[in-house]
Image: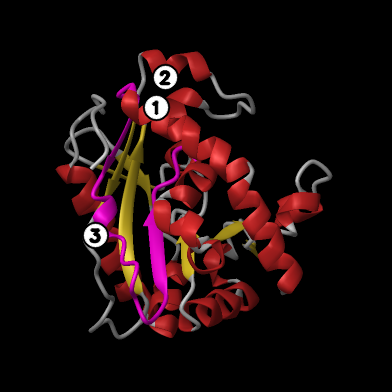
Amino acid sequence: MKRNVRFVAATVYSAGLLLAVFIAILIAARRLKVVGRENIPLQSPGGVLLLSNHPSLIEPILLQFLLGAALFKNPSRYFPWTAADRGNFYDPWYCWWLRRLRLVPISRSRNAGLSDSLALRSMANLLKGGAYLLIFPEGTRTYKAVRRSEYYGMSNGKKMGILRGGMGMLALLASPLCVPIWVEGTDKILPPDKRIPRLWRFLTCPITIRVGSVFVVDGARDHKKAAQVITEKLLELAESAESAPKGGDSQ
């Protein structure tokens, strides 16, 4: 545990600092717009569940630093845990550093999804202990859900994969504060099936991160109804967004 804390702190103060500078430049250049950052609770006595759509492979890195200055003041408290594909833990390109960061391995199988009981218990225990947990409830990147015709289409043209039922189970088990997040534009910077970001596309394709109001899943009697509550909150946030990101200042 102490080794993990030291590695997290080293990551935040080294790679994290460089990323923070890069993000600040993007915001100043109106290439990145963050709306509603103040909606993320920093004084919560319990766990906080950050729920985001998943258009690309950029969000797991970018959203790690959404807590801003608080993260650098106290990384052991505010550096969020993230649910990650279990298969990557055995990939020689990823395994060394994945096993040292705050990641919970989960199955991305269509049959297992977030219903992986061991992963659910691990995440529920983290939330009960007051941790921040970043998760992508679609269970895959959005374009894959669209290919399988397992998605919601919205009136403003946005799309979101159908959420996995295990997501509702996690909310019921841990009763965390839930924060919906909607990300746009990252799939233009890192297109589907590509590994190298097209950084020059920041010139014409800004990224927008929209953070919604905190909510609690209460009144739901089973995990399917709880997952429906989460779905509705994410869809509401997506529907309230612009049809296309236009850049702007961080708020």
At 72% across and 50% down in the image, what residue appears?
88
Query: Which of pointers 1 and 2 indicates the residue nearer the eye?
Result: 1
User: Residue at label 3?
Assistant: 233
Disc 3 + disc 2, Cβ < 8 Å: no
Magenta residues, as a range? 29-58
Against 10, residue 191 (above or below) is above
Which amino acid lies under the numbered mark 2 shown in the image of this protein?
A: Phe
At 24% across and 69% down in the image, what residue appears?
215
Magenta-drawn stretch contains 93: no
Give whichever of 53, 101 is nearer the camera: 101
Picture coordinates of residue 4 (x, y %)? 71, 66
Picture coordinates of residue 137 (x, y %)? 44, 58
User: Residue at label 2?
Assistant: 202
Give whichever of 69, 112 is nearer the camera: 69
Left/right placement of residue 43 relative to residue 122 reads: left
> Which badge, 3 or 2, is on the more N-terminal residue?
2
